[in-house]
Amino acid sequence: MGLIGDVFTGLGSRDAAKAAGTAQANAASSASTLIGQSGFLAQDALSNNFNGAAGRYDQYLYGGQTAAGQMLDATQGGWAGQGYSAALPDTNQVNAPLSNLNPASSNPYATSNLNPSSAAPYSTLDTSAAALHSPDAVSNSFQGITNPYTSFQSPFAAMSNGYAVTNSPSATTNANPNFQYDSSSLQNDPSYQFRLQQGQQALDREMNAQGVTGGAALKAANDYAQNMASTQYAQDYARQQGTFQQNYQNTLGQNQQNFQNTLTQNNSNYANLANQNQANFSNSLNQNQANYQNLSNLAQQNFQDAEAQRNANFTNSLNQNQNNFQNIYNEYNSNWSHLNTENQQTFQNALNQNQANFNNLNTQSQQSFTNALNQNNANVQNTLAQAAGNYARSANNYQLDENTFNTNNNNLWNRLSNLAQLGYNATANVGQLQNQTGANLANLINSNAENQAQQITGIGNALASGAVGSANAMSAANANVNQSLPGAIQKLLPLIGLGG
């Protein structure tokens, strides 16, 4: 059985012993009811002492169990060495020899642009129609002739309407034909004031003669004045209205006469103006037609003269252009023959020079290519040497990191092993405590049982036998743990690199 199995077996034995001890304590408690108060006190003290000691040792026991599990987990993996690649560099990444120095890449004819047949003899001769005088260049001779009807003025354009200046018969009539009475004329009439005064005086004398005074006299005077005013108002109103009607009729008759006179005069003026405009129109039309005919004849003559001059100019220009063309053509043929001879010689010279340049460039390219190839080979060797040095340094760092990892694992194993040993010691101490507690409880029960009846003695002996059996089981479990622990440790040491 392995270490973990032994530890769990020890835990089971411990628990079984603990359960047996508890059962013994319960049995002793039942028996102590008959024994007395002293037995209860002793049993409680021993039970509390056992439980307190077992609780303190539990944490170490479980700590040892956990440490053993961690030890097994830590030994499952090894040193991975991640992050340390000591492979040699890829030689394909080293620059290849220079390939841009190709000795056959320079064409000796690349710069020979002297084509002896490239100059055409007619390339500079201007035979376009723009150089000749086209017959269409003569201006139209009819431009500028005035149309005889464009400036003609209608004989009725400036005539005035005969009714436009005629005054309406009611134009000067009062806009309001209704009569409006003016009362101020009656109040300011001296005759009316005189008659009113005389009448009031006569009324006063009559009232005095009759002895009428006071309010009656005032009423009579007021009635007389109102009657007098009413009578005079009616008369004055009729007089003003008659005057208004007479004035209105006089003004209306005069306006009608003025309107008729003005209308007659306007009609006469309009007829005279129409006759004058008609005569002016006929004269203007005749003059425009005569001018148009004269201009037309002049334009026709000018056009014929221009046409004749243009034809003569065109003939002269055509003859001159043909002469110029023949002269240019003859001169060009002469120049082309001379240029062709020079081009042939220049082309041959350029060809010879290009051939010499090509030979020089080819020799230089071969030398440059050889130098570049040697330099590149040297760079490759230097790169390989540097890569080998980098590989050695990387391998050394890899070994150092692996040693550090193993050292850290050994330290962790030692710490976990010590913790497991502490748990093992705690288990042994719990077993010893259980044995001691059981023995003390058995002695206490046996001591008290001697003073009791036979029945109590039998119960105590039975309980003592159970306690002794539990103690023996716990001792056997502890012995198994002590026997299996060294073998388990020997099995674990090769897993972490400490054993042979």
Image: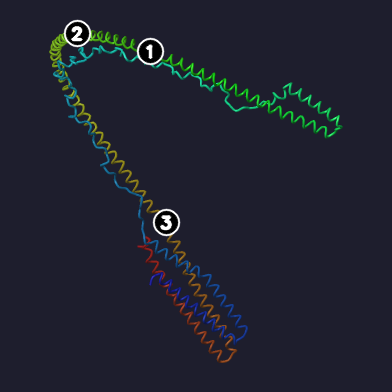
Dot 2 amino acid type: Ala
Quarter of the image where one finds residue 346: top left
Q: Nearer the viewer, mark 3 or mark 2?
A: 2
Q: Name the one closer to the observer, 166 or 488.
A: 166
Dot 1 amino acid type: Asn
Q: Which residue is mark 1?
A: 275
In this rendering, is residue 203 above or below 467? above
- Determine the CA span between mark 1 and mark 3: 141 Å
Q: Which mark is residue 408?
A: 3
- Determine the CA span between mark 3 and mark 2: 124 Å
Helix, strand or loop at disc 2? Answer: helix
Residue at x 21%, y 26% (from the top left corner): 364
The extreme bottom residue here reads 454
Q: First in sequence: mark 3 or mark 2? A: 2
Quarter of the image where one finds residue 318: top left
Helix, strand or loop at disc 1? Answer: helix
Q: Name the one closer to the observer, 108 or 330.
A: 330
Helix, strand or loop at disc 3? Answer: helix
- Determine the CA span between mark 1 and mark 2: 50 Å
Horizontal side, residue 232 vs residue 124: left or right: right
Q: Which mark is residue 130?
A: none
Q: Residues within 10 Å of mark 2 (few under 14, many from 20)?
A: few
Q: Nearer the viewer, mark 1 or mark 3?
A: 1
Q: Which residue is mark 2?
A: 308
Horizontal side, residue 157 vs residue 32: left or right: left
Q: Name the one closer to the observer, 207 or 339.
A: 207
The x and y percentages for residue 425 are 48, 69
